């Protein structure tokens, strides 16, 4: 091979590498992945429960954007630069979403309380909603006339195991019979309706929903004091050390600062004024 032929060959190879690099760069810029880390380039994949319940998601249809968490999800998507048509929904159980390991979603929301224990396995955004724990009952129950924490201590009070609601019973009410354990909120609701327990504890939005739509004669007894650890801060769940955590948190922070989160809470969730604080 002549020196001139070798030089031409090297020049051609160099040009090919440059073109390949430019093509890769253009593809990355066109993907809409804002620097990488998304499950699917150009799409925002959001996880929620199966099923997802009102008032968080109306009619188990998060793609409608109706319900507090569905609306928050699309507001975050907009902050991240995604159109509504570029949002993809997937379903997971509560436990699957917070278990260690890879995720098939970019973020997941189904009322995940931010806790130190869970942060060992997953990342959280900053809170998109903060609530309190609420005692609810039904007409005719001994809890219906309770007006203080002391009035509840001799009663049977239950909640779903592993939840902040269950912890609040033990740490704030401290009933003499101990907290009554249920696998799900549906089990706890059925026990309340059947008179197996006198009252149950749930988060505030769930309390308004259950007492207005699910329980015959449902009644809110009152909120447990948030200052003693009964409150919840809900965060978006991401894979541990996700490249998206900072951007998603920034999006949530922006929505909080510009009043969007408060406006969505007012639209989709009942206000706290209707539930007195128990002391």
Image (tube, rainbow, N blue to C red):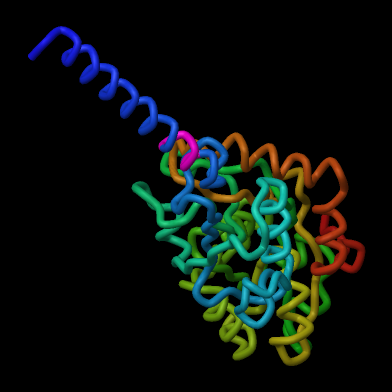
Q: Position of residue 8 (x, y in %)?
A: 24, 17
| Residue at image point 66% right, 67% down | 201
Q: Is residue 230 magenta?
A: no
Q: Residue furthest top?
A: 3
Q: Is residue 25 magenta?
A: yes
Q: Nearer the viewer, residue 165 or 12?
A: 12
| Residue at image point 32% right, 26% down | 17
In this picture, is 103 found above or below 66? above
**Is residue 117 visible in this depiction of the protein?**
no
Q: Nearer the viewer, residue 96 or 20?
A: 20
In this picture, residue 189 sits left or right of residue 274: left
**Is residue 248 visible in this depiction of the protein?**
yes
Q: Position of residue 32 (x, y in %)?
A: 56, 46
| Residue at image point 74% right, 56% down | 132
In this picture, residue 255 sits left or right of residue 85: right
Q: Nearer the viewer, residue 106 or 166?
A: 106
Q: Residue furthest left?
A: 1
Q: Position of residue 193 (x, y in %)?
A: 64, 88
In this picture, is 172 found above or below 152? above
Quadrant hosting residue 11: top left
Q: Nearer the viewer, residue 81 or 26?
A: 26
| Residue at image point 78% right, 51% down | 225
Q: Position of residue 243 (x, y in %)?
A: 49, 36
Type of secondary structure dominating the magenta stretch: helix
Q: Where are the magenta residues, as a range? A: 24-28
Quadrant hosting residue 52: bottom right
In this picture, residue 149 sits left or right of residue 165: right
Quarter of the figure with the N terminus: top left
Quarter of the figure with the C terminus: bottom right
Q: Residue furthest right?
A: 273
In this picture, is 260 found above or below 184? above
């Amino acid at each position: 091979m002549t020196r001139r032929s070798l030089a031409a060959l090297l020049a051609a190879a160099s040009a090919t590498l440059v073109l390949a690099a430019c093509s890769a760069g253009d593809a990355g810029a066109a993907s809409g992945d804002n620097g990488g880390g998304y499950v699917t380039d150009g799409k925002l994949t959001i996880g929620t429960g199966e099923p997802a319940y009102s008032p968080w998601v109306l009619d188990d249809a998060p793609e409608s954007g109706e319900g507090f968490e569905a609306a928050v999800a699309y507001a975050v998507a907009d902050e991240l630069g995604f159109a509504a048509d570029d949002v993809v929904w997937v379903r997971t159980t509560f436990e699957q979403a917070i278990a260690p390991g890879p995720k098939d979603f970019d973020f997941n929301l189904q009322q995940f309380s931010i806790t130190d224990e869970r942060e060992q396995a997953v990342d959280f955004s900053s809170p998109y909603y903060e609530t309190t724990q609420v005692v609810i009952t039904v007409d005719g129950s001994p809890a219906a006339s309770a007006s203080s924490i002391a009035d509840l201590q001799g009663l049977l009070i239950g909640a779903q195991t592993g939840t902040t609601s269950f912890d609040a019973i033990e740490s704030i009410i401290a009933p003499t019979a101990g907290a009554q354990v249920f696998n799900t909120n549906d089990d706890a609701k059925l026990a309340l309706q059947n008179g197996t327990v006198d009252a149950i504890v749930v988060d505030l939005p769930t309390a308004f929903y259950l007492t207005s739509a699910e329980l015959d004669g449902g009644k809110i007894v009152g909120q447990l004091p948030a200052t003693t650890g009964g409150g919840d801060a809900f965060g978006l769940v991401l894979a541990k050390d996700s490249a998206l955590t900072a951007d998603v948190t920034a999006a949530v922070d922006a929505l909080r600062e510009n009043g969007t989160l408060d406006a969505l809470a007012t639209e989709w969730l009942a206000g706290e004024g209707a539930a007195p604080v128990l002391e």
